[in-house]
Image: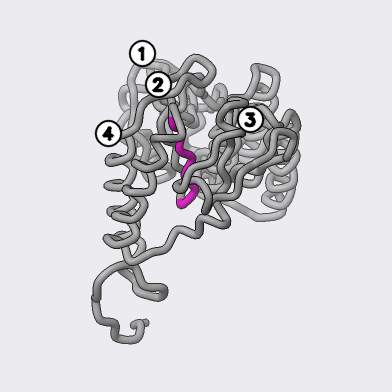
Amino acid sequence: MLSEPFRIGRGVCQGDPISPLLYVTTFELFLRSLNKNLRCIPSQGLSFKTAAYADDLTIGTASLTDWSTVNSQIRKFEALSNTKIIKANSILVPLTANARRTETEDTKSFKVLNENDPIKVLGYQLDSKGYPYRNAWPNTINKLKKMIKNMKECNLSFRGKILVAKTMFISKIWHTAYLTPPNSKQTTEINNMITQWIKGKSKIFPSENYWAKVERIRIKTSLSDTRNSSIKLVLNVTSNKTKAWPEKWKLYLKVWRRAEGSRIFSRKINKTEFCAR
């Protein structure tokens, strides 16, 4: 199936198949320019400048005078990408009393959040101090439960389950983790839900590969610093028959790569950890 002919023009145009690539490229340049010209502000032990998720952008400035730099970079980005940032739909969140009392020409076009007004970031509510809404993770876990319940009705292969876990579940987890990391109890609950769903009642590998079984499946998270965060799905597989392992090593890798295609980290001859990033 072919699309209608299109002409590559300047900037980002709705319906242009190459526009997403242009947008990502220009947006990356915009972020680099902001990070280069802004001063850091402390935020829960981190030095914060910018945080981007898809087309949502959070900018932190050390003072209102930095907004002249921000506006200058916005104008350059708009000219380069042929897009328009709607400032009326953007929100300015003053973090100090002095910032709330001060207004400049560069901040007049933004909607200013009052001290006790609620705010939503990526669909999640924050309190007046900018801390994540306490029900963010319970809401996410409930959504995961509904998604898993719906997926149980689908007759998915092991490969299909891994694909769903990586695309739907992990993205949902990361979306909330962008705001706040889960605690140990929440992490355990998420691990158990996904593990039980992936294992199910059916055998993961063909019957002739009885010598291998899945020992455990877990989510490994490192979300204390969003700049170096990672979420990965980890499967530990243990051989029931160590002697049979070397002869069937190639077959086993072939089965696994066909099912998942992940990178492989060897630990012992009878125990291997597979990471699906």
Q: Amino acid at mark 4?
A: Lys
Which disc is residue 268 wearing?
1
Residue tagged by mark 2? 272
Q: Secondary structure at mark 3?
A: loop
Cα distance, mark 4 to mark 3? 25 Å
Which disc is residue 164 wearing?
none
Side of 156 relative to 137 (left or right) = left
Going 36% across and 13% down the picture, which residue do you hit?
A: 268
Cα distance, mark 4 to mark 1? 45 Å
Whether residues under marks 2 and 4 lie with C-beta atoms below 8 angstroms apart, the answer is no
Point out residue 42 in the picture as x, y percentages from the top left corner.
47, 19
Residue tagged by mark 3? 130
Whether residues under marks 2 and 1 lie with C-beta atoms below 8 angstroms apart, the answer is yes
Can you say which quadrant of the picture contains the N terminus? bottom left
Earlier in the chain: of badge 4 and badge 1, it is 4
Residue tagged by mark 4? 36
